[in-house]
Image (spheres, rainbow, N blue to C red):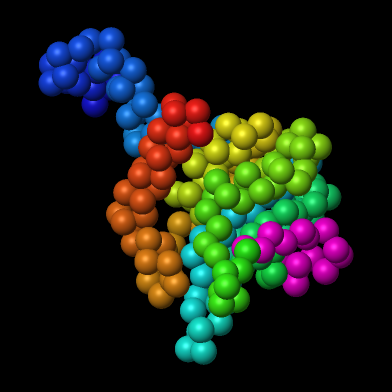
Amino acid sequence: MSGTDLAARLSAQLGDAAIARELAAIVAADTLDWTAPMIAVPRIQTLLGFTFGNRMEANGNRTPGPVNQALAVIAARLAGETGAPVIAQWEVAEPTAALLADGRVRPIFPGRDGRGEPVYLSTLGVLEELARTTPPARLGIVGVVAFADHLPRCVATARRLGFDAYAPAGIAMPTDYDPLSGQAWCRSRLVYLVHDMMLRLTERRAAMLGG
């Protein structure tokens, strides 16, 4: 369905052509577009890695799991090609540091609750915390490393917060879901895509309300 067709359908249902056009643009951007702006790898000055799920051990410990291990391989390869430092959530940072072993990896850890358990750190939360501690302009051109279906939102959210962020051109990100992921929404592609759309629209709503 084209944007024009979507706007016409919404206009017929809502009885308001102007609102229908605005809503159609939002729906198209937040539920129908799964692409991200790209940049050539040699131009990347900082790498930013986002986790995608984890694995829960029988004793309750969290480990990176296979998806984050795959992301780490990509981050280490790009760091080697560009000389860029890596800032990543710990599930990606830990295996990346093991591959680079040169001190270029800065991990991002979640906070802890009163029981010492990690507090879930969202994609938006990661970027907001990073922006509070490091002015986005200081990172230069940011190449984002993330699971393929997660990548567009990572880039879009980073750009909205002032980071000059892109997907690395020509780099295939992981696409295989982990059925044993410790995060239920990271086990199934259909579930994840609905989850991602919900978060995109939630962030959109917050921005519209000035949050």
Q: Residue 119: x, y in percent?
A: 55, 65
Residue appearing at x 83%, y 58% in the figure: 104
Q: Is residue 28 above or below residue 144?
A: above
Q: Nearer the viewer, residue 149 or 77?
A: 149
Query: Magenta span has 97?
Result: yes
Residue 30 pos. (x, y %): 39, 34
Q: Quadrant of residue 28?
A: top left
Horizontal arrangement in the rendering, residue 139 relative to residue 2 (left or right): right
Q: Is residue 194 magenta?
A: no
Residue in front for this viewpoint, 121 or 138: 121
Percent position of residue 91, x then y: 62, 67
> Which residue corresponds to the image point at 57% horizontal and 50% vertical from the top-left?
125
Please report the residue visible at 80 percent of the width from the left and 52 percent of the height from the top.
85
Q: Is residue 79 above or below residue 157?
A: below
The region drawn magenta spans: 96-110
In this rendering, position of residue 196 left or right of residue 137: left
For residue 24, above or below residue 75: above
* Total numbered labels: 0
Is residue 132 rendered to the left or right of residue 182? Answer: right
Work out whether residue 22 can be spotted. Answer: yes
In which quadrant will I find the N terminus? top left
> Is residue 30 positioned above or below 183 on the image?
above
Q: Going by the image, does 164 lie left or right of 29?
A: right
Counting from the top left corner in percent of width and height, residue 79 is at 76, 53
Residue 177, picture quadrant? bottom left
